[in-house]
Image (cartoon, helix red, strand yellow):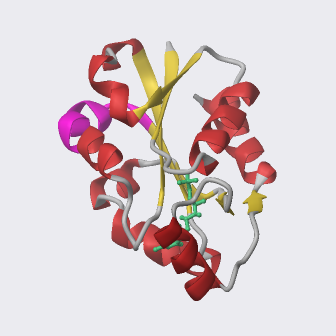
């Protein structure tokens, strides 16, 4: 059986984490952008990793829709969930508030895998918000490779 990694990403950090995770997996895995997930045959997968960044305290809509559409089926599978979020000191609290309670209760892994601010790609308003709220003026990338390795080890050894 296979693992599905379904993600949503506005500026690429969450996608990068999903790609890095897939590279570490020793079992067959499929990467899927949640916006294009309608054609995915969930039956083929015994485990699913769900990944979203946090924007204004919320996960991205394609991940919410994916969960709403497939909730019953997903609750029958092994699940992991990760977020990417800039307020690392509030990661846990934000995860609890933004993700469905049933998903969190069922998931064997739930973590913040880091964050990035990509000033080359961000639109004007997003740059302004990051400058005002975080005081960041240049691009940053703080992906936790160790946490990605931890999730990969869980999937490789236990799933
Ligand atoms: C407009 C904007 C709003 C954000 N809101 C939050 C937030 O509410 N909480 C948080 O922890 N991080 C917040 N962030 C930081 C993002 O979660 C972080 O940059 C993440 O790595 C983005 O992932 P992505 O590149 O996959 O879209 C925000 C970033 C931007 C640009």
The location of residue 131, given as percent across then percent down, is 62, 81
**Residue segment shown in magenta:** 68-78
> Is 12 a magenta residue?
no
- Examine the image and state in which quarter residue 158 appears: top right
Residue, x 58% and y 76% (percent of image)? 130
Residue, x 29% and y 54% (percent of image)? 102
Residue, x 37% and y 54% (percent of image)? 60
In what quadrant of the picture does the C terminus appear? top right
The location of residue 97, given as percent across then percent down, is 35, 72
- Examine the image and state in which quarter residue 34 appears: top left
As displayed, is residue 158 above or below residue 59?
Answer: above
The location of residue 14, given as percent across then percent down, is 58, 47
* Most foreground residue, 137 or 21: 137
- Examine the image and state in which quarter residue 56 appears: bottom left
Residue, x 33% and y 20% (percent of image)? 42
> Is 74 a magenta residue?
yes
The secondary structure that dominates the magenta segment is: helix
In the rendered image, the residue lying farthest to the right is 146
């Amino acid at each position: 059986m296979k693992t599905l990694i379904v993600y949503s990403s506005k500026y690429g950090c969450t996608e990068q984490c999903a790609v890095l995770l897939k590279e570490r997996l020793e079992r067959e895995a499929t990467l899927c952008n949640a916006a294009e997930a309608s054609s995915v045959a969930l039956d083929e997968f015994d485990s699913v990793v769900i990944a979203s960044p946090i924007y204004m305290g919320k996960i991205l809509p394609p991940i919410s829709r994916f969960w709403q559409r497939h909730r019953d089926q997903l609750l029958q599978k092994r699940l992991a969930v990760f977020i990417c979020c800039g307020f690392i000191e509030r990661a846990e609290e934000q995860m609890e508030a933004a993700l469905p309670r049933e998903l969190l209760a069922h998931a064997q892994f739930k973590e913040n895998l880091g964050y990035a601010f990509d000033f080359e790609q961000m639109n004007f308003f997003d740059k302004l918000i990051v400058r005002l709220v975080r005081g960041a003026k240049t691009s940053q990338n703080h992906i936790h490779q160790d946490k990605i390795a931890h999730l990969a080890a869980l999937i490789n050894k236990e799933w």
